[in-house]
Amino acid sequence: MSSLRIAGGRIIDPANGVDDRVGDLWIEDGRIVAAPADPDARADRTIDARGYVVMPGGVDVHSHIAGSKVNAARIMRPEERRGEDRVMRRWRGFRSGTIGSVPSSFTTGYQYAGLGYTTAVDAAIPPLGARHAHAEFGDVPLVDKAMLVLMGNNHAILDALREDDPARVQRTVAWLLDSAKGFGVKAVNPGGVEQWKQGGGRIAGWDDRVDHFDVSPRQIVVALAKAVDALGLPHPLHLHGLNLGLPGNWTHALEGMKALDGHRVHLAHVQFHSYGGTPEDPGGIDAQVGPLADYVNTHAGITVDVGQVMFGDTTSMTADGPTGHYLANLLGRKWYNHDVEQEDGCGVSPIEYQDKNFIHGLQWAIGLEWFLRVEDPWRVAMSTDHPNGASFRSYPDVIALLMDKNLRDESLARLPEKVRTRSALGDLSREYSLAEIAIVTRAGPARILGLLHKGHLGPGADGDVTIYAPDDDRRRMFALPRWVIKGGEVVVDDGELRSAPIGSTLFTELEVDAATRSEMGRKLAAEASFHPSSFGLGLDDMAEPRAVSRPTPG
Amino acid sequence: MPNGLISRKSIHDDAASGSSTSYTCTHCGCLCDDLELVLSEGRVVEARSACETARPRLVGLSTTPAASPSPRVQGREVGREQAVTEAARILAGSRAALVMGFRRSTNETVRTGVALADRIGATIEVGDEAASWPRLAAMQRVGSVGATLGEVKNRADVVVFWCADPMTTNPRHGERYSADVEGRFVPEGRSGRRVVVVDERPTATAGGADVFLKVRPEAELNVLLVLRALVREVPVDAHRVEEATGCSLADLQGLAELLQGARYGAWFSGGLAGRGPIAEAESRHQTVTGLIRELNRKTRFVAVGLGEAGNSHGAESVLAWQSGFAPGVDFGVGFPESLPGESTAAGRLARGEFDAAILVGGPAYDALPEGSRARLATRPWIFLGDRDHEAFELATIALPSATAGIDEAGTFTRVDGVSLPVRALRPASSPTEGEWIDALMEAVGLSGRDAGAPGSEAGR
Ligand code: SF4
Ligand SMILES: [Zn+2]
């Protein structure tokens, strides 16, 4: 039994309706507990948090931190990890590492924790990449990890759809998720990646047909969303839709939401899907957040994360192979591509977002518009789609912009004139409160993920707590938490790492019957380059596995 | 710090006599995981699905543990604890240690090996570094365009073997992944694919090809450059092409057209992207990627390595995720640095710029040039590996270790990045390499090697 008391802090715990209330928090054996009845009770350790702001640990709903494409980006880009300011030095028992836009594994955990984040979800792991990604998770300390498993181009799913067998789609989803020991279901350019691999005409609309499988993106996402709901998964279908990054794609984003009417869905990095104009006239691009945010505001089943772009050098990486190819050619940069059997693959290229570039400036403004136009902060989550829009390390800068209209105006004034005319950012006067920041960075993402033990400070919640020194400089406040507590253990104290527990791997436990396993194994045997027995992972293949309970279906 | 290491079941756990059990072969880059070993009376009596390279190495292996050999310190047999203490003393006192090898080690072992190198500020190099450096240097310039082997199996209607002879080096490549196998979009198997072999002379693989093009090793790079130019539709001079490549322009044009006519093409080569001068390996890799990228403007095409025995690709991947670099890293200044050509472990070894060394696995010793072996003998060095390997007798300290795929289970990574479980066929009689390294870590302790500014803010 070890106990920690965080005494006298200004607690901001939106999930429990607590907004800046001075009080004590008690953590015992890694979980938040009710304050003991005995007023003289003592904890093993007490943190004097008087004057400090106390929030749950941060939760990242969409990030890319492990697996083969992340690792390829590291290998491909030594140029961004050379120099004293791009490394972490070995210190005590902590590991050294490199930062760049894609930090090495231990450094990823240290850097997340350094910002007060204690949970991060990798949003795109192909089923066959799960073994590698889980191994990497074992070297990412301090954050609890989970992975979303790619299924929007999966051959077994597409076969079941072609044969109009929704029950088999559902069985396949469960089997894939269980085999990969994943947490949730992701679809990326549904059908479009498969079509690109086949060399067929581009999939540009929800009713285009994927060759050979003869299914449409609409059929794929509706079937996946149904399966996710029927299985009662904690997190809705996590969708990266069609035409990412292309002018005019906002109509497809809207149509995608309508297609999924009646289902829960989470739209990933929605900033990249909110562009006006047309592919034929890319110069006509403008912000189309208004109509999309209106739709989100009036449809309760939809949540989004933003994929905020910040200026600077970073790396684009996507399971959306054709988009990766398009981007590499557009930028004229080096291109890593890796097609993965059964499902997707990835494209990786360096990218520099420049504040002199109109398109980049517009992307920046569109992201901020999303944060400011979604009325209910519970339904919009902080993300830079790390590292696509920027590194997760720039979250404090995004927070500062959300809390300060003047700061936004100053930044906007430095961008090309057209950014101001093609977006309405300058007209949006909303400023986030601390409680709203707490929602978009932890309480909201935890709820979106369906993690009942994360993102809040009520009894039973994980003892993941971040304590900030209030500061008018919001960037500094959120970049340098005073203490970070993970599972009841102080892991960061005044900017210094104190310990580095590895953290759990969160996954959804599903029952897959023997008949399904052998049915799926047979299909896999015919197509795969490996033996079916090599495919499914067990708890032994995971770092600190922790099954997440499912809410009752329905 | 806990590092989430993984324990795995070995096949001997459920292998009764006469039973058969699935097995992953590590004897070439195919990493076939579909073998079935038949066990009887404490031996492997049959290896189903194994090729003729693998079968003789598997049939006859004992499935019961051998006697446990003792560690050695300067030729003397000592207990495990003493060996660890003495090895740790060498490492803790070192200022410029080398950590090398991991050609056939599990990914789990490499995770501990990189941790040790980080802890003692060593220079580490993993896998088949001579081939990895040029391949990765090329990737760092231009990227790479690849796929898992299942994509080739299911989609490729054009398969190119570039200056390589997989029928000899990777015997089951064709039946499992490339030329012959039936796939979703190539249901006919071999007859649904065009197979091209480019090489210096007709090989076994060339014998089964639809197209064979003869190219001298010295001309390989030029052939690649011309193919790229042709796909790019850059005008070329027939006479100069013939002079530079030794091939007729018509032949090269024919090949370029065949490549462009693919629906999904797959280009295979060995680790050095050909048989030509090693100094040109990086340029060859880079030009292959340039060619493949060019082809992707018109159709789909990927390039994949044939791979080598063991787990070089897994080792490289682990080092990269932990440090950010591959295949070599210098931890000497307290954080990872990687400068090809300057601070490689092999280079330091050859120049004598080290004061201690650890070699993990016999294949690392086998790959050393004579001069480097002589250098090694002048410093204290530690060998982790098979009792029967010659290095065991030569090392200052020798720690007998289990062998992955024989008496150690774990994960290997195929040349295409697919990680697969490797199973043991008998219980271990020695600690694994990873267990030795963990013990060394513990014995070395923190040893006062902290470097510079601490904390999560470092590097902001
Ligand atoms: S092809 Fe290679 S991996 Fe497969 S059985 Fe033969 S030697 Fe082993
Ligand atoms: Zn993403």
Image (spheres, rainbow, N blue to C red):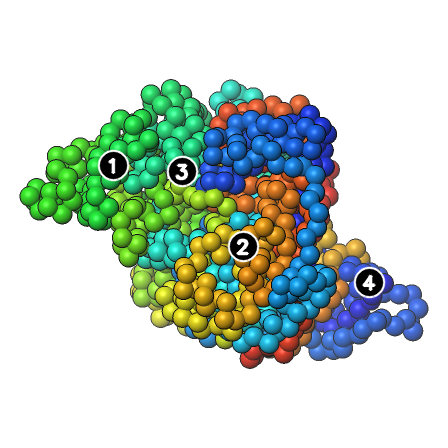
Residue hosting label 4:
A28
Left or right of A230? Residue A43 is: right
The residue sitting at 69% across, 44% down in the picture is B66
Residue B282 percent location from the top left of the image: 31, 55
* Residue named by callout 3: B169
Give residue B201's mark.
Answer: 1
Q: Is residue B319 above or below residue B443?
A: above
Give the image quarter of residue A183.
top right
Mark 4 is on which residue type?
A: Glu
| Residue under disc 2 on the same chain as residue under disc 1 | yes
What is the three-letter code of the residue carrying label 1? Answer: Arg
Q: Are marks 1 and 3 in contact (CB under 8 Å)?
A: no
| Chain ID of residue with mark 4 | A
Secondary structure beneath dot 1 equals: loop
Q: Please, what is the three-letter code of the amino acid marked with disc 3?
A: Thr
Q: In the visual, does B433 lie left or right of B149?
A: right
The label on residue A42 is none
Q: CA distance from mark 2 to mark 1?
A: 36 Å
Q: Residues within 10 Å of mark 4 (few under 14, many from 20)?
A: many
